[in-house]
Image (cartoon, rainbow, N blue to C red):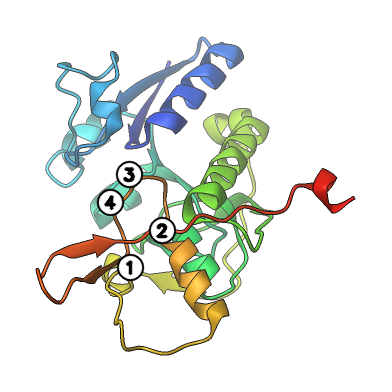
Amino acid sequence: MKRILVIIDNLQQYEKIQSLINKKNRANLNFDFYHSNVPTDIWDHIDFKNQNKILDVNQKTDWILENFHMVVSVHCYQFFPAKLVNGIRCINIHPGYNPVNRGWYPQVFSIINDLQIGATIHEMDEKLDNGPIISRKFVEKFSWDTSLTLYNRVLNAEMELLQENFDKIFDGNYLTKKPETGGNFFSKRDFKELLEINMDETDTYRNIINRLRALTHGSYKNMYYTDPESGRKVYVNLSLIPEDEKEKD
């Protein structure tokens, strides 16, 4: 029996992966799911709630090496230590096309910097979102996409890649390719620097709209300006509604 540790911080992907595991019905694979100590919706799922499923990979590296044959990271909010990625096969399912979209919130920087976007499954090394690529694919990006709509398309691509490569990944009989270049890396600090609007800044409509839609992610409070009288933050979301194809006729 091959024991596989999955560290996941995305509820939507958890439910899809569970469905895929059930569909595959591989009796020789045992999946054990944990999440990080950053609160997300997954904490309230019946499979995790009150189950003591928080795992710190830095504190539990030795335990992981002793008890599992491989580790899978799915939108995990932790950086894996060198001892872990060098001691056991660690696979990352990343919501970006490596090496173009390494780092935090790939869809945001794809919109702002007009970069291609997609999904990647890769072996992990000592750098963030780096390492030999197992499989990857692009997704379409439209001028009316917000961070959320593009992100959802990337999530679907992740699951398509996992389904296509499931047996190869967990049987360890796949080929990898090295990233062509170091690519682009965007940090959480890079993201935070985008959030505050300078009301005196001038720019083109194109750049302003791109920044607004890149930081519009459903009900999340991202981009804001500060009201000069009260000092309160005022959050801004952008609604983009493409003309219906039938209306064009």
The vertical placement of 133 against 196, above or below, is above
Going by the image, does 19 lie left or right of 243? Answer: left
Kindly report which numbered mark, 2 or 4, lies closer to the viewer in this rendering: 2
Amino acid type of disc 4?
Answer: Phe
Task: Report the Cα–Cα distance between label 2 and label 4.
Answer: 18 Å
The tag earlier along the polypeptide, 2 or 1, is 2
The tag earlier along the polypeptide, 3 or 2, is 3
The x and y percentages for residue 210 are 52, 70
The disc at residue 80 is 4
Task: Report the Cα–Cα distance between label 3 and label 1.
Answer: 17 Å
The vertical placement of 7 against 111, above or below, is above
Residue at position x 42%, y 56% from top? 216
Say if mark 2 contacts mark 1, CB within 8 Å.
yes
Task: Report the Cα–Cα distance between label 3 and label 2.
Answer: 12 Å
Amino acid type of disc 1?
Answer: Phe
Query: Which residue position holds label 1?
Result: 191
> Quick one: label 3, few (<14), some, or many (20+) residues within 10 Å?
many
The disc at residue 105 is 2
Query: Which residue position holds label 3?
Result: 76
Say if mark 3 contacts mark 2, CB within 8 Å.
no
> Quick one: label 1, few (<14), some, or many (20+) residues within 10 Å?
some
Residue at position x 62%, y 52% from top? 241
In this view, the residue in front, 81 or 76, is 76
